[in-house]
Amino acid sequence: MKDRRTSIIKQLLKSWKNKTPEKYDLTVSENKIVQSEKKLFKDISELIYNSKNRIIDLSNSELLTLFWNVGRRINEHVLQNKRAEYGKQIVVTLSKLLVRIYGNNFEDKNLRRMLRFAELFDSYEIVVTLAQKLTWSHFLLLLPVRNTDSRLFYAKKTLNESWSVRDLRNQMSLKPSKDHL
């Protein structure tokens, strides 16, 4: 049942992509709708459009929270065993199992990114706040930033100014410093 729901949500998100209430082409007969019905259609279209955007935001936020929790949980497990070599082994082994069941988001390269994500953004509250507007791609750009203050500065600017991934990349390239990579 859950897989069916997930499939339906994915189909809805795919069909909704880049569609706004203004972008629908209507037939001649549909254009003859009286003014009040046009307003009703517009109002309902806006409700659907706004709901769609909230679903996307919630889905993104939940995915980021999942990635952070996966990274945190692996970090906790590896630290308990206090062996770096064990940590490398467990990521590869765990990845193989997770990919088989849950797909390529859990390849070892991504698990390592999740580990780094949880390590660098160590506060759940900060992650939840940033996840409202930032995507995984934003975080992937922020992970190589060595300086914590710089990393949080760019994260907060992205949140407050609604920077796209491209905007963030451009802003980060304007002030190259030893803090990056």
Image (spheres, rainbow, N blue to C red):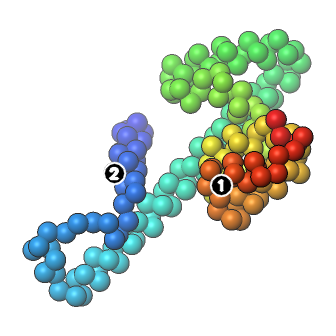
Where does residue 49 sit, x and y in percent of width and height?
A: 40, 66
**Residue designated by label 2:** 15
Up the image or down, 172 lies above or below 80; here it is below
Query: Label 2 near label 1: C-beta < 8 Å?
Result: no
Sequence-wise, the earlier of marks 1 and 2 is: 2
Q: Residue at x 65, y 13 (%)?
A: 93
Crowd tier of the residue under label 2, counting other residues whose Cα lies within 10 Å: few below 14, some 14–19, many 20 or above = few
Question: Foreground residue, 110 or 74?
Answer: 110
Question: Foreground residue, 138 or 176?
Answer: 176
The disc labelled 2 sits on which kind of residue? Ser
Q: Residue at x 55, y 56 (%)?
A: 57
Rendering quarter of residue 157: bottom right
The disc labelled 1 sits on which kind of residue? Asp
The residue positioned farthest toward the left in the image shown: 29
Circle 1 or circle 2, nearest the eye: 1
Q: Residue at x 67, y 15 (%)?
A: 92
Q: Secondary structure at mark 2?
A: helix
Q: Secondary structure at mark 1?
A: helix
**Residue designated by label 1:** 167
Q: Residue at x 79, y 29 (%)?
A: 75
Quadrant occupied by the C terminus: top right
Left or right of 102, for residue 41: left
Up the image or down, 53 lies above or below 107; here it is below
